[in-house]
Image (cartoon, rainbow, N blue to C red):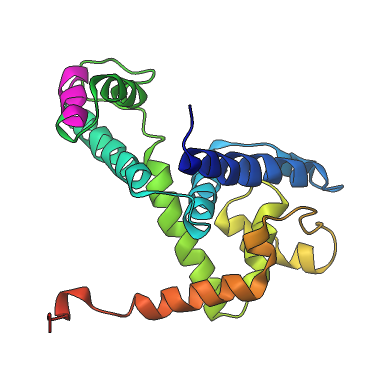
């Protein structure tokens, strides 16, 4: 029932971010509440999980497309599109009827299907991915990749990771007991991020074919 991409995506997203940060949070003797999720950490949690998919090569173009389509559909619903209009939007984008109905359901969870409102959680995947990717690059530029690893010590926001840095350094908060392989290999992570910093300086709009 699941493709190789689906399996890898679920493993890196659900197991090695959401579940792992909960388990590491339980290990905190002073602040065990870091095992608990809350709305204030959702963007970072989902962004970190989606970033894990991206950096391990587990995310394919179809999943990126689904995330982008949901973000656009949420904007449509908030601007007045009803359930049928959103359903047709997904169909026109290439999804079959069953997948389009499921996608439209995600947009209208808990809100009237007549339009004007939307369940906006799906926007955090893309926003969170951009925020987490930028955070990792910024920490690399400041030679502070250790802060990125502390994000796995529990469920926290990006701001929390900076704020808690003195507590980790003093030993009050424990570093994560378990880490995904791609995070624990600091040199490999630094290499990928360094290339990303370089590649993002290339202006695609100024490239001319030879």
Main SS of residues in magenta: helix
- Whether residue 210 is visible to the viewer of this picture, yes or no, is yes
Q: Does residue 142 appear left or right of residue 169 in this picture?
A: left
The picture places residue 111, in percent across and down from the top left corner, at: 33, 18
Q: In the rendered view of the protein, which quadrant contains the C terminus?
A: bottom left
- Does residue 154 show up magenta in the picture? no
- Which sits in the foreground, 56 or 183? 56
- Which sits in the foreground, 5 or 73? 5
At x 26% / y 39%, what residue is drawn?
A: 69
Q: Does residue 140 appear left or right of residue 5 in this picture?
A: right
The picture places residue 1, in percent across and down from the top left corner, at: 48, 26
Q: Which residues are magenta?
A: 82-91
The picture places residue 191, in percent across and down from the top left corner, at: 54, 77
Q: Does residue 101 appear left or right of residue 10 in this picture?
A: left
- Which sits in the foreground, 121 or 68? 68
At x 78% / y 59%, what residue is drawn?
A: 175
Tally of numbered tags: 0
The picture places residue 86, in percent across and down from the top left corner, at: 20, 26
- Whether residue 42 is visible to the viewer of this picture, yes or no, is no
The image quadrant of residue 8 is top right
- Which sits in the foreground, 29 or 3? 3
At x 36% / y 28%, what residue is drawn?
A: 119
Location of residue 122 with respect to 48 vertically, above or below: above
Location of residue 179 with respect to 165 vertically, above or below: above
The image quadrant of residue 89 is top left
């Amino acid at each position: 029932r699941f493709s190789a991409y689906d399996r890898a995506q679920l493993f890196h997203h659900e197991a090695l971010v959401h579940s792992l940060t909960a388990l590491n949070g339980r290990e905190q003797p002073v602040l065990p509440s870091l095992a608990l999720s809350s709305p204030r950490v959702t963007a970072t949690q989902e962004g970190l999980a989606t970033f894990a998919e991206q950096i391990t090569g587990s995310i394919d173009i179809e999943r990126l497309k689904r995330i982008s389509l949901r973000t656009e559909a949420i904007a449509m619903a908030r601007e007045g599109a009803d359930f049928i209009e959103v359903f047709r939007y997904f169909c026109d984008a290439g999804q079959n009827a069953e997948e389009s109905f499921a996608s439209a359901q995600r947009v209208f969870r808990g809100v009237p299907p007549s339009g004007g409102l939307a369940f906006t959680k799906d926007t955090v995947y893309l926003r969170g991915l951009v925020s987490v990717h930028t955070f990792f690059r910024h920490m690399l530029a400041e030679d502070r990749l250790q802060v990125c690893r502390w994000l796995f010590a529990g469920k926290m926001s990006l701001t929390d990771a900076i704020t808690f840095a003195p507590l980790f350094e003093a030993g009050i908060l424990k570093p994560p007991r378990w880490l995904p392989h791609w995070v624990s290999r600091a040199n490999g992570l630094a290499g990928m991020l360094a290339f990303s910093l370089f590649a993002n300086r290339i202006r695609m709009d100024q490239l001319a074919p030879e």
